[in-house]
Structures are given as C-alpha cells and as structure tokens.
Image (cartoon, grey):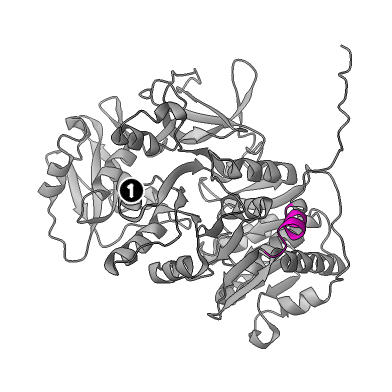
C-alpha cells in the first residue's frame, strides 16, 4: 500500500503546559481566587500563576525529580495545588492526586504502589502524613503547602516549606517540549474490588479531554465564565476543570476545605461565580442553606452534577426556584473522567417541559471522542430503544487502555469487528437519539423473578419525598423471587414518616412489582471517599435481614 501524503502543518505536541502559556499570554489579568486554610482570600492572575509554576518546576528539577517520576498531593482545591499540577506535569513528571478521605493504611499503600518521590500536602492533613510517613520509603521529600511562618513542627517527619522550595527554582526556566504521549497524571480508582488501581493519563489524552469538556454541548465553558470547582482536585482532577478553565481563559475560584452551604454561597456571591461542578451530596448542603436563609443566586447559572445519579427533584429545585441549569453528567476515573452530558438538541425544542425534563434526567449524550454501546452478557449488541438494559462499554482517546503497572491484567474486551472496548461495570439504556441512562451498577442491579429492577430509579423517587434526606435501595434475598428491593431511608429531622407512607409514595409511579417490599429508617447511610453510597456496607449491615412474609 502506498504511503499517505503527509500534511504540512506545524508539529507541536499537545502538552498541558500550553494551557498556562496560553492563559498567561492571552488572559494575563484574569484571576485565580482561593479561599485558604488560614481563612483569608488569596488572589492573583494567570500571568502570576504561570511564572510561579515555571519556577516551581525548576525547583523540582533541581531536587532531582526526573521525567516520569511521581509527585503525590494531599490537598484541597487551591492555587498551590494547581501550581503543583502544572509544575510537575509541565516538566514531564507525573502528578499523583491522592484522596485524603481514604483510610491512612490505604493511602500508604497507594503512595508505595505509585512510588511517589515527593508528597505535597495541606496542613489539615498533617496527621495523615505523620501516620503514613514511616511506611512510605520511596518518599524522600514531604512538602507542607504553606508560608514559612505557618510551618508546623513534627517529631515524625522532616518537612520542607512549599514557598521555600519554590524559591529554590529559577525564574527564567522555560517549559520543555517532549512526547505528548508521556504520562502527566495518576489517579487511583475507588470503584474497583480489592486494592485501588491507577489510571495513568497522558498529556495528549488530557488536552483532548479538556477541549471536549469545554464544548457547547458539554460544560459550555468560555472566558465569560467564573468557574468554582466544588468537585475536589483529588477526585479525577476536578473533572478536568483546572485544565479546561485556562484553555478558555475563565476566572477560577477555589473553595479550599470549606464546602458547607454557607461558605460556598458566600464565595459564589462575592466572586460572581457563573459555573460549578460537584456530586449531589454537596449540593444538598448548599440548597438547604439557601432555602433556610431565603437566598437567591445573583450570577450562578449552571452546574454539572455527576459522580452518582442526580435526583430529578434536585434538577427541578435548581431550575424552578433558583434558575440554575443542571447538566447531568456521567464518567469514570478510567475516562479522565467525562463520558456523557445531558443537553438538548434542536429537535427537542418542540417537546413539552416534562418531556425535556425526562431527557435531562438521563446521564446524557456522548461528547466527541467517546463512543459507547450496550451489550448482553454474551457481548452481543443491544438495540438503542431506551428500554433494553445492557452492560455499558466505551472507547476513545481518553479512555483507559490498561491500569498502572498492568494491575488486573487486560481490562478491555474485543468485539466481533475487532474493536477494543472498556467495560464500565454500569448497566444502562440508550435511546434512539443516543441518550444514555445508567440504571445501575452491574453489581447493584436487583434481579427479581428473572427481571431487573433499577435501584437508582427507586432511590431517585424516594428522595423526591419532602421528608427524605437520603435513600438507598439494595436487593435482599427472597425464597421465591431470588431478590427483592429494600429501601433504606434517612428522614429529615423531626419528620413524621412511616413505612406505609413510603410504600404509598411509590404507587402509580413505578410498576407494582418494583415497589420495595420493606423500608428501614437509619441515622445515616455509609458514603465512600468520593461521596457515593457504599452499597457493599449496606449489604453487610442488612446481611441477616429477612423481609416481612419471606419465611
């Protein structure tokens, strides 16, 4: 076969350092604002930030952090954390964001598996650092992300001050160019069984993901936006926002450790936030605050909600009471993380508000770069009719090919056409217009009498009840039907709610055989490190539970 004719365009590698070079040159006075642990507000510009990032990268180089070596972070959303993102990745090393909500033993395991050479941390995590340091031999430098006058004393570990480390670098240091397929970030997924597995992102995949995230039918980001990522920078790189914001020149606002409703609302108002992103549990606190204090949003106009299914009642509350558009999204650590977002097409303009709402409740349509399909257990393709349940498979340039160090073997499957797909572990439907809806995790779907019941649909209905704060549905053993749904509910303080009330609430809304057989009221529902309901813990808690009339 004859070689193809090569194009004659400039061959410039896709590197994350280009985001900050672009922002510093073309949006030099746009601000990055951070609420610090000290309680004050720090603000500087993209031009200031890029200069400090280059100086920090030079300091890391002088300290012997080589290409491909990992630098860990245990930090909240803030300007220093973003500086580490770019300094480490921009010089060709790998930033390894660590979730501080994990157990210290698990954090130590992750640090050792990643072979971090340096670990940068916020002072609120000093106790974690002191707990793991004796068990992390690969870490040679522990960096406290604070000013010199805030440096803590530790009898366990020798600490380096972040600002003093940065001062060791050269101000004239310039970003290097190298292979765009070089690794830039490492995130460990909490969604696997056994020990976490690492997803190792490339510069190329990260740049393409940031482009796609900014598109009009995705997060719709622009230089007119003021972006506040509530989703943590240790949760799949804050869904790509630290990269997408400088790409478009948007102002960035970092909330630090204060994610309560009052603190978030005050920051939204004082900084003119227009766009945010986070998991449903965070928005519950913000909505409760604005409701209790009769507040309105002056500038806040849209938010991406993902991480777990967003209850339809939350979408309606944001829209009808606060004029905030909710963009329902789905993704995974293995997808960098964005896969789909729910926005309407021109053909949907003629639909009623209720019909549009039903579409927007789904996890949405793929963005360019992601392909998907649903298959049965024999990996045969299922129709896109909106009703057929199947195992969700995805592929694309920012989808994982293998886990870090080859853990777990080859995660991909090959279809009849020879194409490689990543099995997400989700069960979903896809309608004729390509809108995907997660109905369950494959391990959480309730199989009753040979039919599937969606625990997510039942949970979304439950939280629409005004007396319900939180709800989860699990399958429990049944001698005749194999499994039946059990509803677990956290009531609002002082609410008068009975089992019979909840059962009646489902009537007429779902098929009779979907209605939970029983309801259990609890003080709290266990949540994982990323705010998702821990169904495994609930199943353990109710492992000996017997449904009424099942014996």
Q: Position of residue 40 (x, y in %)?
A: 55, 80
Q: Determine the image quadrant of residue 254.
A: bottom right
- Residue 318 visible: yes
Q: Position of residue 239 (x, y in %)?
A: 57, 50
Give the side of residue 406 with respect to residue 481, left or right.
right
The reply to whether the magenta stretch includes residue 464 is no
Can you say which quadrant of the picture contains the N terminus? Answer: top right
Front residue of 110 and 122? 122
Q: Position of residue 179 (x, y in %)?
A: 83, 44
Q: Residue at x 29, y 67 (%)?
A: 294
Q: Position of residue 6 (x, y in %)?
A: 88, 25
Q: Residues within 10 Å of mark 1 (few under 14, many from 20)?
A: some
Front residue of 61 and 538? 61
Q: Which residues are magenta?
A: 19-29
Q: Residue at x 35, y 59 (%)?
A: 284
**Outermost residue to the top:** 1
Taken as a whole, is the magenta stretch helix, strand or loop?
Answer: helix
Relative to 414, residue 472 above or below: below
Q: Residue at x 50, y 61 (%)?
A: 273
- Residue 138 visible: no
Relative to 375, residue 302 above or below: below
Q: Disc 1 marks which residue?
A: 539
Can you say which quadrant of the picture contains the C terminus? Answer: top left
Q: Determine the image quadrant of residue 151.
A: bottom right
Q: SS for tag 1? A: helix
Relative to 67, residue 145 above or below: below
Give the side of residue 192 with respect to residue 547, left or right.
right
């Amino acid at each position: 076969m004859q070689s193809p004719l090569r194009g004659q365009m400039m061959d410039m590698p896709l590197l994350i350092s280009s985001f900050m070079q672009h922002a510093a040159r073309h949006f030099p006075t746009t601000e990055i604002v951070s609420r610090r642990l000290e309680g004050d507000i720090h603000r500087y510009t993209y031009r200031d930030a890029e200069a400090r990032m280059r100086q920090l990268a030079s300091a890391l180089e002088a300290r012997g952090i080589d290409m491909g070596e990992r630098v860990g972070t245990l930090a909240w959303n803030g300007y220093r954390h973003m500086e580490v993102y770019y300094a480490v990745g921009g010089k060709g090393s790998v930033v390894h964001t660590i979730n501080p909500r994990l157990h210290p033993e698990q954090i130590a395991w992750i640090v050792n598996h990643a072979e971090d050479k340096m670990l940068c941390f916020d002072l609120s995590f000093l106790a974690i650092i002191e707990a793991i340091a004796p068990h992390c031999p690969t870490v040679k430098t522990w960096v406290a992300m604070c000013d010199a006058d805030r440096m803590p004393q530790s009898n366990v570990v020798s600490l380096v001050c972040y600002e003093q480390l940065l001062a060791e670098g050269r101000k004239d240091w310039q970003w290097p160019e190298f292979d765009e397929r070089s690794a830039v970030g490492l995130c460990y997924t909490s969604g696997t069984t056994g020990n976490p597995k690492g997803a190792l992102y490339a510069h190329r995949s990260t740049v393409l993901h940031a482009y796609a995230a900014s598109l009009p039918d995705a997060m719709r980001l622009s230089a007119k936006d003021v972006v506040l990522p509530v989703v943590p920078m240790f949760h799949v790189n804050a869904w790509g926002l630290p990269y997408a914001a400088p790409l478009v020149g948007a102002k960035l606002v970092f909330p630090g450790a204060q994610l309560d409703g009052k603190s978030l609302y005050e920051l939204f108002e004082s900084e003119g936030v227009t766009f945010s992103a986070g998991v449903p549990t965070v928005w519950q606190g913000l909505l409760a605050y604005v409701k209790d204090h009769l507040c309105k949003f002056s500038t806040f106009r849209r938010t991406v909600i993902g991480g777990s299914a967003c209850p339809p009642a939350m979408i309606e509350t944001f829209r009808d009471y606060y004029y905030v558009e909710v963009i329902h999204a789905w993704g995974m650590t293995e997808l960098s993380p964005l896969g789909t977002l729910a926005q309407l097409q021109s053909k949907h303009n003629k639909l009623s508000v209720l019909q549009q709402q039903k579409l927007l409740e789904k996890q949405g349509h793929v963005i360019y770069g992601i392909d998907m399909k649903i298959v049965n257990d024999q990996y045969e393709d299922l129709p896109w009719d909106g009703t057929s349940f199947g195992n969700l498979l995805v592929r694309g340039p920012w989808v994982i090919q293998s886990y870090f160090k080859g853990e777990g073997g080859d995660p991909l499957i090959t279809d009849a056409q020879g194409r490689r797909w990543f099995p997400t572990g989700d069960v979903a439907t896809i309608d004729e217009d390509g809108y995907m809806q997660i109905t369950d995790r494959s391990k959480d779907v309730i199989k009753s009498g040979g039919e599937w019941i969606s625990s997510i649909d039942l949970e979304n209905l439950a939280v629409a009840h005004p007396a319900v704060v939180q709800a989860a549905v699990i399958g429990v053993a049944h001698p005749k039907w194999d499994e039946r749904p059990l509803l677990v509910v956290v009531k609002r303080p002082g609410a008068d709610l009975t089992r019979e009330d909840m059962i009646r609430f489902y009537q007429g809304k779902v098929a009779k055989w979907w209605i939970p057989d029983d309801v259990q009221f609890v003080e709290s529902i266990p949540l994982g490190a990323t705010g998702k309901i821990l169904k495994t813990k609930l199943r353990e808690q109710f492992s000996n539970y017997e449904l009424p009339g099942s014996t």
